């Protein structure tokens, strides 16, 4: 089963099987899954052939940048050659 949703956000870490499916999905679209916070918003922009997502900000030395008591985030967008695949099923 696959999802037809255009936006997704977890409110807590998913079970390992679902987490691995999402990591595979992100990797298949050229996104480093370890740069994407669990609770970030991921958006499939089918018509534009893009994926927009929140990612951790890293400094020039590769360390995560802090923003107060949390790690800084930025919105990134990946341009694809074709429409992004549907999201993995949530269970």
Image (cartoon, rainbow, N blue to C red):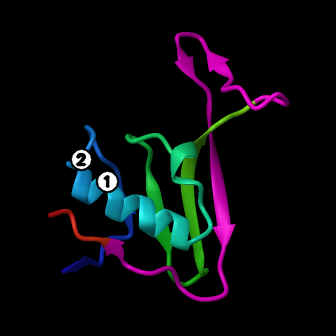
Residue furthest to the left: 91
- Direction from residue 16 to residue 39 in the image, left or right: right
**Residue at 27% across / 39% down in the picture?**
11
- Direction from residue 36 to residue 62 in the image, left or right: right
Nearest to the observer: residue 18 or residue 81: 18
Is residue 80 located in the magenta-colored stretch of the structure? Answer: yes
Q: Considering only vertical position in the picture, is 47 above or below 41?
A: below
Q: Which residue is mark 1?
A: 19
Quarter of the view holding residue 21: bottom left
Task: Rate crowding at label 1 as few (under 14), some (14 to 19) or many (20 or more) other CA atoms within 10 Å.
Answer: some
Quarter of the view holding residue 85: bottom left
In space, the residues marked 1 and 2 are separated at their CA atoms by: 6 Å
- Where residue 80 sits in the image (x, y, percent)? 65, 79
- Where residue 91 sits in the image (x, y, percent)? 14, 64
Is residue 16 located in the magenta-colored stretch of the structure? Answer: no
Q: Which residue is mark 2?
A: 14
Q: Which residues are magenta?
A: 59-87
**Residue at 23% across / 58% down in the picture?**
17
Task: Rate crowding at label 2 as few (under 14), some (14 to 19) or many (20 or more) other CA atoms within 10 Å.
Answer: some
Residue furthest to the bottom: 82
Circle number at residue 47: none
**Residue at 30% across / 46% down in the picture?**
10
Question: Which circle's residue, 1 or 2, is located before the other in the chain?
Answer: 2
Asked whether the residues under the numbered discs 1 and 2 touch, taking CB atoms below 8 Å apart as contact, a structural biologist would say yes
- Where residue 16 sits in the image (x, y, percent)? 25, 50
Q: Considering only vertical position in the picture, is 46 above or below 28?
A: below
């Amino acid at each position: 089963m696959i999802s037809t949703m255009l936006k997704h956000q977890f409110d807590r870490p998913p079970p390992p099987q679902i987490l691995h499916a999402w990591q595979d999905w992100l990797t298949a679209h050229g996104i480093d899954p370890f740069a994407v916070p669990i609770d970030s918003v991921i958006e499939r922009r089918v018509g534009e052939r893009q994926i927009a997502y929140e990612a951790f900000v890293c400094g020039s030395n590769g360390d995560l940048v802090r923003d107060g008591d949390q790690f800084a985030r930025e919105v990134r967008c990946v341009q694809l050659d074709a429409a992004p695949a549907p999201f993995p099923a949530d269970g």
